[in-house]
Amino acid sequence: MGQGTGLQVVDDFIELNFPNLSRLEYQITSPQTPEYNCIAWAACDNTRWWWPANDYFWPEGVERNETLEAFIQAYKTFGFESCQTQLLETGFEKVAIYVDSHGGPTHAARQLRSGKWTSKLGPYKDIEHNSLESLNGKEYGSVGCILKRPIK
């Protein structure tokens, strides 16, 4: 068990599916829940599942397409704009959108004020991880773009 959190420190699912994520690079920060996904979590929404399919929440006015451009537009409705770097910038929060080898969105992560990143692993657990690259691989592909918005 994690010190003071009551959450498991090592997780077989995470270790198996994210081989670039070393045990020293992540911390589990929530129990498993199907209430929301990574796309919602990156936008600070832990109340619903976001995806462009008709049965899920998707921002009004944004095309329901599984394209990087549609996902960028979805985040823009919440004040995000494109940026060039994943480095921590005072006064801003950032989102990274991962894409597969065909450019289709697969995952999103949000930067924390510490400079680390937080991810919801599908219907699984939330984790805090040190780098975006640690989630690169077969599951999520690699980062396709970075967005930022001023912290309110």
Image: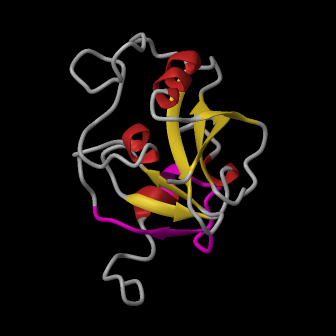
Q: Residue visible at 28% across and 36% down?
A: 49
> Residue farthest to the bottom?
3
Q: Find residue 120 and report its horizontal and vertical position in percent.
A: 41, 50
Quick one: 97 or 73, which is closer to the camera?
73
Residue 77 appears in the picture as rendered: yes
Quick one: 112 or 106, which is closer to the camera?
112
Quarter of image, res 51: top left
Quarter of image, res 4: bottom left
On screen, residue 67 versus residue 57, left or right, reads: right
Q: Is residue 88 above or below residue 74?
A: below
Q: Is residue 56 above or below residue 85?
A: above
Residue 144 appears in the picture as rendered: no
Q: Residue visible at 69% across and 50% down?
A: 133
**Magenta part of the chain:** 16-31
Q: Find residue 108 and report its horizontal and vertical position in percent.
A: 51, 40
User: How many numbered marks have been drawn onto this rendered protein structure?
Assistant: 0
Examine the structure image and report whether residue 50 is included in the region drawn in magenta.
Answer: no
On screen, residue 24 versus residue 123, left or right, reads: right
> Residue farthest to the front?
152
Q: How is the image coloured?
A: secondary structure
* Magenta stretch, main secondary structure class: loop
Q: Residue visible at 25% across and 15% down?
A: 54
On screen, residue 124 versus residue 105, left or right, reads: left
Q: Is residue 21 above or below residue 82?
A: below
Q: Find residue 93 and report its horizontal and vertical position in percent.
A: 59, 51
Q: Find residue 111 and report its horizontal and vertical position in percent.
A: 58, 55
Q: Is residue 139 above or below residue 113?
A: above
Q: Residue visible at 31% across and 82% down?
A: 6
Quick one: 51 or 26, which is closer to the camera?
51
The quarter in which the N terminus is drawn is bottom left
